[in-house]
Image (cartoon, rainbow, N blue to C red):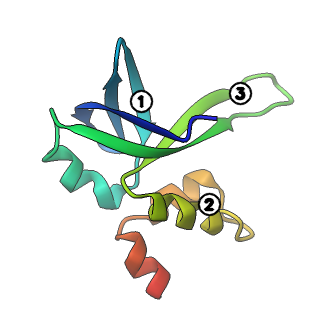
Amino acid sequence: MIASLTGELREALEDRVHLQVGPILYELLVPAADLASLRASVGETLTFYTILYLEGDPNRGNLEPRLIGFMRASDKRFFERFTTVKGIGVKTALRALTVPVGEIAKA
C-alpha cells in the first residue's frame, strides 16, 4: 500500500496531478476542490495522502491501478468513509468533491 507520497508537483491538470518523486513521475487523481490551490503550487514540494484502488472489470482481466491523492490526511479519511455509502463508488466520490471536504461533512 502507498500511504503517502512527497515530491515536486510538476503539473496540475483537470482532475489529476503529476508528482515527481525521485526518478518516478506519479499520476494522482485529485478532488476538484483542491485544483485551484494545486495549480498555484506547481514546482513546490508537496505531500499527498494516497489511496490505491483498481479500476476496471476483474472478469475481463483489465484492471488498472489508480492513485488518488489528498492534500490532508483528514480528507483521505473522509473519502474512505464517504465511499462506504451505498451507491457511492470511488469515481462518484471524486466527482462529488467539488467543494472542500469540511463543507460536505457539515452538510
Q: Disc 1 residue type?
A: Glu
Q: Quadrant of the N terminus?
A: top right
Find out whether the residues at labels 2 and 1 contact each other: C-beta distance under 8 Å.
no
Residue 63, numbered circle:
3
In the picture, measured across the screen, residue 53 lies left or right of residue 4, that is right
Mark 2 is on which residue type? Glu
Q: Nearer the viewer, residue 9 or 73?
A: 73
Q: Amino acid at mark 3?
A: Leu
Question: Relative to 38, does residue 66 appear above or below in the rendering?
Answer: above
Instruction: Tell me if label 3 and label 2 are in contact, CB under 8 Å.
Output: no
Q: Position of residue 20 (x, y in %)?
A: 31, 23
Question: Alpha-carbon neighbours of circle 3 within 10 Å: few (<14), some, or many (≥20)?
Answer: few
Secondary structure category for the residue under label 3: loop
Front in this rendered view, residue 99 or 51: 51
The x and y percentages for residue 60 are 82, 25
Give whichever of discs 3 and 2 has the lower sequence position.
3
Place of residue 64 in the rendered image (x, y in percent of width and height, measured from the top left): 64, 27
In this orientation, which residue lies closer to the viewer: 51 or 104? 51
Determine the image quadrant of residue 47: top left
- At x 20%, y 55%, the residue is 36
Residue 88 horizontal side relative to residue 77, left or right = right
Earlier-in-chain disc, 2 versus 1: 1
Crowdedness of circle 1 by 10 Å Cα count: few (<14), some, many (20+)?
A: some
Q: Label 2, on which residue?
A: 80
The CA distance from mark 3 to mark 1 is 16 Å
- The residue to which callout 1 is attached is 27
Badge 3 or badge 1: first in the primary sequence? 1
Disc 3 vs disc 1: which is toward the camera?
Answer: 1
